[in-house]
Image (cartoon, rainbow, N blue to C red):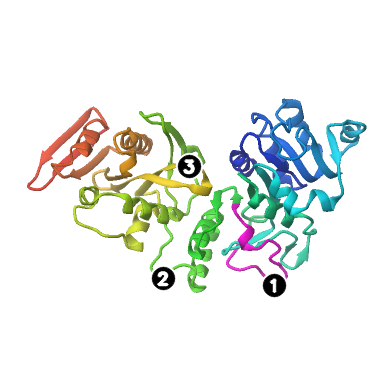
Amino acid sequence: MQRIARYIAGIIEDGSTLQIGLGQLAHEALQYLTDRKDLGVHSDVISEAIFPLLESGCLTGARKTSQPFKIVTSMALGSRRLYDLIDRNPLFVFQPIEVVCNPATIAAQHKMVSIAQALAIDLTGQVCVDQFEGEFLGGIGNQGEFLHGASRSPGGKPIICMTSTTEDGKTSRIRPALLTGEAASIARTDVHYVVTEYGIAYLFGKSIRQRATALIELAHPKFRPELFAQAQVLGYLPADQTLQNLRAYPVEEELTVTLKDGRTVMLRPALSSDAQGIRELFHHLSEADVYTRFFRNVRGLSDVEVQRLCNVNYEDEVAFVATTGNREALQIVGQSCYFINPTTNLADTAFMVHPDWQGCGLGSALQACMVNHAKRRGLRGFVADILPSNDRMLRLARNGTPNVQAERNSDSVHITMLF
């Protein structure tokens, strides 16, 4: 629960206007927003979850587009403490539900955030918020209007959150298809962010293949093989795609780095859903960059080759990406990987860096990230074969560790970096 709440909080920016609702996950997320600035509230219902925000001083409403400095709602549900706070308090504005929940009014708010707690989602992104396995557990309420409005708000964020399984861990809430008796109460076209304890997926504008891949990575690892197999049966994923990563996403390995020119990037473990971003990175490389990376002239990467760079098992294969921009317009500007030889306990390494990001220290940052990761795993070092003309990569390799050995072959330089 806390991990999901932290993921949600990480999406929400200063100056956002929040629709809170009554979902437990949304309430948990508010506890991690007390360091934000100038948050606002425009919500169908408010509860005591707003107290931490009020007490920290971050809930000012100063940047709201409509009715700034006011908490706008239609209902309040809580204890006497909440009602006493509201009584005769000009901070609160109560309006009819049809006014507060008008999608046009919601969309007019700058950075409108709507958080909906789902009961199930299928691999295309259809969401059920009121039924589970045929049983009605609530009503749809105004969630559709708020998600729709938030998706059209400047800087808005519609967020679907859920635990990946039922409380007993026996049933996945991520399904190949919604079951009979689980209506698609939120259309896939209105789904942007989906959050579970295994990470965040951004689905808007993605293909069915990209959606299925991203959602499988949000599922509990024990359910991923069956979801993957069903996705292939349904034609969502090609028959030659494989499932390698069955571990929980290690959010603790995410690292934000400031480069020599002042730009920042996030370094993180690669995901299968990074395939399209890596393919786009490849197509930005010059012919010379492609040749020095692959030792041959390559016009494009096949699906299998792309998956080799991001769909890894994190046992004897490890990959990282460097990303820039927000999740709505994420760009992969660097990729690195290492492949372990268990006989020598050394790993072969490889890098790709976008031409616009070369010469600013991104390669060094990726290498340092991989070295630290490999050291924690007890590896002896890295090896690499580099073309003699590739001065940049030769310098990078020699700066990786103090103990570097270089052996010139007929067509390459074999580098051994011992930790």
Q: Earlier in the sequence, mark 2 or mark 3?
A: 2
Q: Which residues are magenta?
A: 174-193
Q: Nearer the viewer's eye, disc 1 or disc 3?
A: 3
Q: CA separation, marks 1 and 2? A: 27 Å
Percent position of residue 263, x then y? 41, 33
The residue labelled by disc 3 is 325
The residue labelled by disc 2 is 239
Q: Secondary structure at mark 3?
A: loop
Compared to residue 177, the image places residue 286 above or below, namely above
Residue 348 located left or right of residue 175: left
Q: Residue at x 52, y 73 (%)?
A: 234
Percent position of residue 298, x then y? 24, 58
The residue labelled by disc 1 is 180
Q: Earlier in the sequence, mark 1 or mark 3?
A: 1
183 magenta-colored: yes
How would you rate the neighbour count of disc 1 (Cα within 10 Å): few for under 14, some for 14-19, many for 20 or more?
Answer: few
What's under tag 2, amino acid-wise? Ala
Q: Main secondary structure of the magenta part?
A: loop
* Image quarter of residue 359: top left
Depth order, front residue of 331/400: 331
343 magenta-colored: no
How would you rate the neighbour count of disc 2 (Cα within 10 Å): few for under 14, some for 14-19, many for 20 or more?
Answer: few
